[in-house]
Image (tube, rainbow, N blue to C red):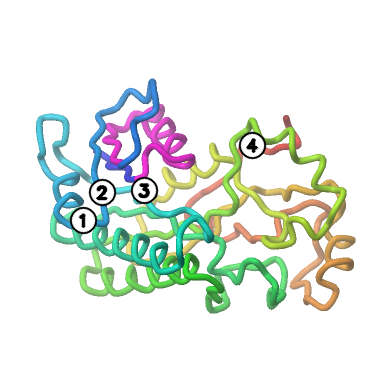
Amino acid sequence: MIVVTGSSGLAGRFVVADLKAHGYDVVAVDQAPQPAGQGVPFFRADVTDFGQTMAALSAVDERVRGVTGIVHLAAIPAPGLAPNHVIFDVNIRSTYNVFEAARVRGIKEVVWASSETVLGLPFETPPPYVPVDEEYRPRPETAYSLSKFLGEEMAKEFCRWDPEMKIFGLRFSNIMPPERYAEFPAFDADATARKWNLWAYIDARDAAQAVRKALESPLKGAEAFIIANEDGVMSRPNDALLDEVFPGVPRKRPLTENESLLSIDKAKRLLGYAPEHSWRKG
C-alpha cells in the first residue's frame, strides 16, 4: 500500500490515478477535500503535525494496512504563495515529519517532491552550463528552494542512519496538465518570458510515471533526479534561444533543436524513466 500526501493537488491527482491504474493500493492524504471520483481511501491530515503524520501511516482503521511506501507531495508548491518564513516552515517541517514517521514505522520506500528551483531558478544568475544536471551543487535562491535543498540534505542523513531506506527527491520541472498545451505556441513570442527555467516543463502524466518508477527502483539511499520532458516549451531552436538570452553560458555538448535543457539523463539511466507525452503531440 502506498500513501500519497498532497493527493488533492495537481501532481497528487495524477500520481494517485497512475498508481491505481498500475495495480497499487493507494491511500490519499491531504488537508484539501478529495477530488471527485478519485476512488481511493482518503484521510484529511496535516503533515506539519507529527502526530497526524504518524496516524496517516498507521493502522488508523481497516483502510490502512501494510504501508510499504510513501509519496510525499504535500507542500506550499511555489515561491510567493505565502510569506517566506511560512513557506520554509511548512515545507521543511512536513518533509521532516514524513521522513521521521517512515523511519519509525519501518517504511523503506519514500519518494518526495523536490524542485527544479534548487538548480538556481529563476536563473537571474545564469546556469553554469547547459543542459543543467545534478552534478553541480544546488543554488537555492528563495525560501521555497532552500526548503527543498535542505530536504535533500535531510534525506542523506536519514539514509545514513538506515542504509536500507530509499529517499528519492524528484526535482520536478513546471508541471503542466494536458489542457494547458493550448498556451504553448504563444511562448515563442518572447524568449525571456520562460527563461527562468530554461524553457522546460513536465507533463503531469510523466511526473506520475517518474514517481512510480522511483518507487519501483531497487536502488537504496538518498538520490535527487531532475524530472522534465524530453523537449522544451519553445518551437524556436535551442541554439537561437541561448544566443539571445544566455550567450555566455557554456554548452556541454551539441544540442538538438528542441531538447530539454534540464537534463533527464540520470532519471532515464537509473530509474528507467521515459517521457511518453509532449505538447507537440497535442
Pick out the residue farthest to the top.
37
Residue located beneath label 1 in the image: 49
Q: Give the amino acid type for the residue marked by disc 1 in the picture.
A: Asp
114 in magenta? no
Evaluate if marks 4 and 3 touch, with contact meaning CB atoms under 8 Å apart: no
Marks 1 and 3: in contact by CB < 8 Å? no
Quarter of the figure that contains the C terminus: top right
Where on the picture, by quarter, is residue 60?
top left
Q: Residue at x 15, y 40 (%)?
A: 66
The amino acid marked with disc number 4 is: His
Disc 2 target residue: 46
Which numbered disc flags the more N-terminal residue, 2 or 4?
2
At horizontal 84% and vertical 46% (from top left) the residue drawn is 235
- Image vertical order of residue 263 relative to residue 31, above or below: below
**Residue type indicated by callout 3:** Leu
Element type at marker 4? loop
- The residue at the point 39 percent across, 63 percent down is 86
Read off the magenta span: 6-30
Disc with the residue nearer the chain's start (4 vs 1): 1
> Residue 20 occupies which quadrant of the picture?
top left
